[in-house]
Image: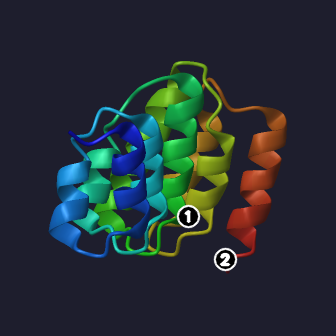
């Protein structure tokens, strides 16, 4: 029977997209985060991970990692954007994910800029968001 450490090692080292996709069903947030850092994780698995929830800290870290993933396409990034917006609306602060999304050319500036208007956004986040978006031009 595999241990949590076995799942983690597999999520970090595996290159087969179908195996990585099956690992999304694993109940451990550290495995989800490992999948979000594995460059071989396919977009379909990333999309499923965008809906995974555990705790504030783990959720915010996962959203940040997904926003930075090299295989995250527009569909995945829109799902991450929606997840980040929901977190901000709840008063949480997934600021690293917001700034990572601002650097993604797959998303339009206006889509990301709206995050700065939500309840959890601070003045500092709005300033950093504006700077990040202005550097895209």
Query: Measuring 46% from the left and 54% from the top, which residue is drawn there?
Result: 34
Which quarter of the picture shows residue 10?
bottom left
Say which quadrant the N terminus sits in. Answer: top left
| Residue count near mark 2 (Cα–Cα under 10 Å), binned few <14, some 14–19, many ≥20 | few
Depth check: 75 or 107 in front? 75
Q: Residue furthest front?
A: 1
Marks 1 and 2: CB-CB under 8 Å?
yes
Residue under label 2: 136
The kind of secondary structure element at disc 2 is: loop
Residue under label 1: 109
Residue 68 placement (x, y as % from top left)? 54, 64
Query: Measuring 22% from the left and 71% from the top, which residue is drawn there?
Result: 17
Q: Residue furthest top?
A: 90
Lateral position of residue 76 relative to residue 12, left or right = left
* Mark with earlier residue (1, 2): 1
Q: Is residue 62 above or below residue 65?
A: above
Q: Is residue 17 above or below residue 78?
A: below
Query: Measuring 54% from the left and 70% from the top, which residue is drawn there?
Result: 104
Say which quadrant the C terminus sits in. Answer: bottom right
Residue 119 placement (x, y as % from top left)? 61, 23
Depth check: 99 or 29 in front? 29
């Amino acid at each position: 029977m595999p241990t949590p450490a076995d799942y983690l090692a597999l999520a970090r080292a595996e290159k087969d997209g179908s195996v990585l996709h099956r690992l999304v069903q694993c109940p451990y947030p550290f495995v989800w985060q490992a999948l979000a850092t594995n460059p071989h994780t396919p977009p379909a698995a990333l999309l499923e991970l965008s809906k995974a929830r555990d705790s504030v800290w783990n959720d915010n870290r996962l959203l940040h990692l997904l926003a930075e993933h090299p295989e995250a396409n527009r569909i995945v990034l829109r799902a991450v954007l929606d997840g980040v917006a929901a977190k901000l609306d709840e008063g949480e602060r997934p600021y690293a994910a917001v700034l990572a999304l601002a650097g993604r050319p797959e998303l339009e500036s206006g889509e990301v800029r709206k995050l700065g208007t939500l309840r959890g956004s601070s003045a500092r986040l709005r300033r950093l968001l504006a700077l990040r978006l202005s550097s895209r031009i």
